[in-house]
Image (cartoon, grey):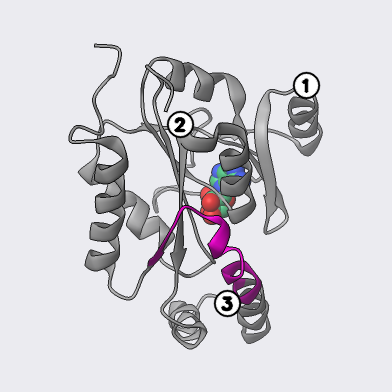
């Protein structure tokens, strides 16, 4: 960790592993952690049943593919990846600003995104791989959602199998067999790496 810099913690895992739930629990435990608002080429999604959509600069920065690629070319995006046909990337300047201010940042990235972050930030980034207890359990979780066709589930599982091979490149692997336990393990990792007061502004 740089003398005054903040730390980056990035959580990734295969589709259906429960990453969103774990991340939102961790955000509740560590409310001082900053968000990194990503840039994406996907369209804003509804956030409720009243027709409200995700907001520009709140949920994401929504850009065309052309705009996105230009940002990547000029270094405005420090890492990016494709997920389900859309591009997602971390804007460089806001992240650098937060780190320089000594703020800690929690990121929700694809597996390639976490690995790219680690490569750029080394010890200043902590990467956590959230793994399913088994591929069979992941299959039943994906089937349980009822939102994907069987061929899509098969594809997701094949992808998950490949993704599990990358767990070894992460700093930590947490198996999500039980939500509370997984959240507790992530909390322990954060406390261990970030000291007693992970949300504190180190500039103080
Ligand atoms: P969603 O469309 O559900 O909001 O996000 C899809 C996936 O994109 C999430 O699993 C999340 O991990 C990933 N993602 C969001 N922002 C970024 C980013 O800036 N970089 C990378 N590499 N992945 C991202």
Q: Mark 1 points at which residue?
A: 74
Identify the residue shown where x is 29% and y is 48%. Answer: 26
| CA–CA distance in space, label 3 to label 1 | 37 Å
Considering depth in this image, is 52 or 34 the residue closer to the camera?
Answer: 34
Q: Distance between the residues labelled 2 and 1?
A: 23 Å
Mark toward the start of the polypeptide (2 vs 3): 2
Is residue 15 placed above or below 66 in the rendered structure? below
Above-or-below relation of 13 to 176: above
Helix, strand or loop for disc 1: loop
Q: Where is residue 78, by image quadrant?
A: top right
Say few, some or many: other residues with alpha carbon within 10 Å of mark 1 (under 14 / 14 to 19 / 20 or more).
Answer: few
In percent of width and height, residue 80 lies at: 68, 41
Tell me the crowding category of disc 2: few under 14, some 14 to 19, or many 20 or more residues within 10 angstroms, Cα based: few
- Would you name the residue on which mark 2 appears? 58
* Pointer 3 local density, CA inside 10 Å: few below 14, some 14–19, many at least 20: few
Horizontal placement of 154 versus 114: left or right?
Answer: right
Query: Magenta segment range?
Result: 160-174
Name the residue that disc number 3 marks. 148
The verdict on residue 42 being magenta is no
Residue at disc 1, CB closer than 8 Å to ligand 1: no
Q: Pointer 2 and pointer 1: residues touching (CB < 8 Å)?
A: no
Dot placed on the residue nearer the N-terminal end, 2 or 1: 2
Relative horizontal placement of residue 61, taking residue 136 as reference (left or right): right
Quarter of the view holding residue 1: top left
Q: Quadrant of residue 29?
A: top left
Percent coordinates x, y for residue 160 in the rendering: 59, 72
Does the segment drawn in magenta span residue 163?
Answer: yes
């Amino acid at each position: 960790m740089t003398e005054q810099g903040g730390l980056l913690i990035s959580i990734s895992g295969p589709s259906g592993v429960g990453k969103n739930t774990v991340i939102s629990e961790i955000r509740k435990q560590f409310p001082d952690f900053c968000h990194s608002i990503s840039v994406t080429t996907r369209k804003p999604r509804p956030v409720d049943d009243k027709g409200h959509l995700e907001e520009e600069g709140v949920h994401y920065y929504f850009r065309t593919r052309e705009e996105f690629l230009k940002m990547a070319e000029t270094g405005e995006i420090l890492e990016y990846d494709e997920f389900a046909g859309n591009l997602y990337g971390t804007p460089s300047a806001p992240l650098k600003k937060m780190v320089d201010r000594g703020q800690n940042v929690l990121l929700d990235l694809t597996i390639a995104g976490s690995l790219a972050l680690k490569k750029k930030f080394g010890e200043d980034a902590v990467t956590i791989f959230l793994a399913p207890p088994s591929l069979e359990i992941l299959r039943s979780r994906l089937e349980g959602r009822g939102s994907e066709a069987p061929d899509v589930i098969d594809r997701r599982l094949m992808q998950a199998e490949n993704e599990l091979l990358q767990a070894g490149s992460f700093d930590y692997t947490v198996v999500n067999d039980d939500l509370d336990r997984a959240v507790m393990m992530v909390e322990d990792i954060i406390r261990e790496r970030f000291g007693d007061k992970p949300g504190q502004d180190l500039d103080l």
